[in-house]
Image (spheres, rainbow, N blue to C red):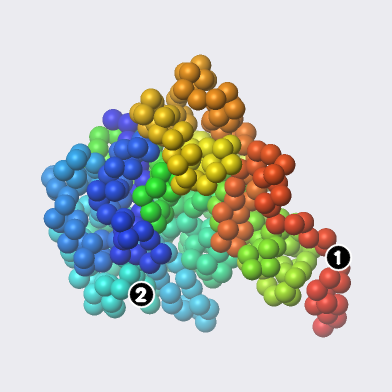
């Protein structure tokens, strides 16, 4: 069975999420998108766990089903903030659970460690090895996956997390880590540059805080498996039946380039290095993005292809493409009309983006939109890189280019701080 899965989501009980982010909306928009397996999100939150038990149906497969037929796997994200070796550490972890009984045991464990009722993504002072060992004591079928591993603030390998390797974070429990989530700001090719990551399965998910089609499933995983928890975990651990991932262009992610959002400064790694990672406007430390961080840790050249790795496709969400072409907001009536016309004809947004022929597209939409959909499928759309919490965006015109942060003229003494470099 072909399974298109988004395994990292949130509910209305997480901070900064839509208050309508419930199972009815998740089911509806997953079908519009073309997904057939979702993470439940937030199972540690008591109210959301009650909704999981009341609105989803459990059977022996370990995959829960809504009354409308959407498939869900029990999933949660936790935030670990603690000290190790005299340094602060911050890591987000995805947990997958095989059934409701095991999930109750997970929740009992966390309730002994702190509060779980204030946020769907709760925070604990639990080191990564301790969490992993504790989960495995509950059930070996629990999957522990470091989330968006390159994100600066809470990614395992991010510039601010405190770790330079999976082994440094998980120590003797590294043996129980099989998969890593690449995050929006990196793609598998960037991860292939680190030989230390060769044995990990690279997965991609939306980490969505809403159900809208430009968020849910913007990154996803495609499997050819029996739809059971056992076969899903086998695919994550061995790559058997793992066909490919769907990625956004990493430049689209909010932390691809370096920069300062408040200063309207966006810089490539080479530009940041020339400035010694100091913002040329405010003189403070730049937020170091994913491309820069990958370059710091990589032991292989750009363009290296890992033999036997799960392949991937790069796609910008359909709504984002239409928004730029129609010069209208992503949630405006103008964009929705075009989006609905395409989806109603082809069945889902993924069918439009992945499978619709240019001949069929031209019968439904304009040649310009057809052209960009085909270019998107081929990974040929230019993206203005995201930085310091700002999403990147497609660049189709001169007007789009004007939306980019102005180029910074890099001079040796621009900040004044560089005068002191090398003098002490």
Q: Residue at x 27, y 40 (%)?
A: 231
Most distant residue in the front direction: 333
Is 341 positioned to the left or the right of 117 in the image? right
Quarter of the image with the C terminus in it: bottom right
For disc 1, the marked residue is 411
For image coordinates 83% across by 60% down, the residue present is 409
Residue 53, image quadrant: bottom left
**Would you name the residue on which mark 2 appears?**
124
Query: Relative to residue 361, is residue 305 drawn left or right?
Result: right
Is 86 above or below relative to 312? Answer: below
Expressed as whole percent of the image width and height from the top left, the position of residue 317 reads 49, 41
Instruction: Estimate how packed mark 2 is, as few (under 14), some (14 to 19) or many (20 or more) residues with alpha carbons within 10 Å.
Output: some
Q: Position of residue 416 (x, y in %)?
A: 83, 77
**Tag 1: Cα neighbours inside 10 Å, few (<14), some, or many (≥20)?**
few
Helix, strand or loop at disc 2?
A: strand
Could you tell me which residue is drawn at 24 percent across and 77 percent down? 112
Residue 14, image quadrant: bottom left
């Amino acid at each position: 069975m072909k399974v298109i899965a988004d395994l990292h989501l949130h509910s209305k009980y997480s901070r900064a999420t839509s208050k309508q982010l419930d199972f009815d909306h998740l089911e509806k928009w997953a079908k519009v998108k073309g997904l057939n397996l979702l993470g439940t999100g937030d199972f540690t939150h008591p109210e959301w766990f009650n909704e999981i038990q009341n609105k989803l149906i459990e059977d022996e497969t370990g995959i829960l089903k809504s009354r409308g037929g959407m498939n869900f796997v029990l999933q949660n994200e936790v935030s670990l903030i603690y000290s190790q070796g005299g340094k602060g550490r911050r890591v987000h972890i995805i947990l997958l659970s095989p059934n409701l009984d095991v999930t109750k045991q997970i929740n009992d464990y966390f309730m002994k460690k702190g509060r779980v009722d204030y946020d769907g993504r709760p925070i604990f002072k639990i080191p990564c090895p301790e969490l992993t060992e504790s989960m495995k004591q509950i059930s070996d079928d629990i999957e522990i996956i470091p989330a968006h591993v390159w994100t600066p603030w809470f990614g395992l390998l991010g510039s601010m997390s405190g770790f330079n390797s999976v082994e440094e974070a998980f120590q003797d429990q590294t043996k129980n880590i099989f998969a890593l989530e690449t995050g929006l700001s990196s793609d598998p090719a960037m991860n292939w540059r680190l030989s230390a990551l060769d044995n990990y399965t690279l997965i991609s998910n939306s980490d969505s805080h809403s159900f809208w089609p430009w968020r849910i499933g913007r990154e996803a995983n495609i499997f050819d498996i029996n739809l059971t928890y056992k076969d899903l975990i086998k695919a994550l651990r061995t790559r058997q039946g793992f066909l490919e991932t769907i990625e956004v262009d990493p430049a689209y992610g909010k932390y691809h380039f370096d920069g300062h959002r408040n200063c309207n400064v966006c810089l490539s790694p080479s530009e940041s290095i020339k400035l010694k990672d100091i913002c040329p406007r405010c003189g403070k430390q730049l937020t170091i993005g994913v491309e820069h961080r990958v370059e710091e840790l990589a032991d292989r050249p750009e363009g290296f292809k890992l033999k036997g790795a799960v392949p991937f496709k790069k796609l910008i969400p359909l709504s984002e493409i239409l928004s730029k072409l129609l010069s209208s907001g992503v949630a405006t009536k103008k964009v929705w009309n075009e989006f609905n016309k395409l989806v109603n004809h082809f069945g889902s947004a993924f069918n439009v983006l992945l499978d619709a022929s240019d001949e069929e597209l031209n019968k439904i939409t304009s040649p310009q939109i057809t052209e960009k959909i085909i270019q998107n499928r081929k990974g040929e759309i230019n993206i203005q890189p995201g930085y310091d919490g700002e999403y990147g965006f497609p660049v189709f015109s001169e007007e789009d280019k004007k939306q980019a942060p102005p180029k910074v003229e890099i001079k040796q003494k621009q900040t004044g701080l560089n005068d002191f470099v090398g003098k002490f």
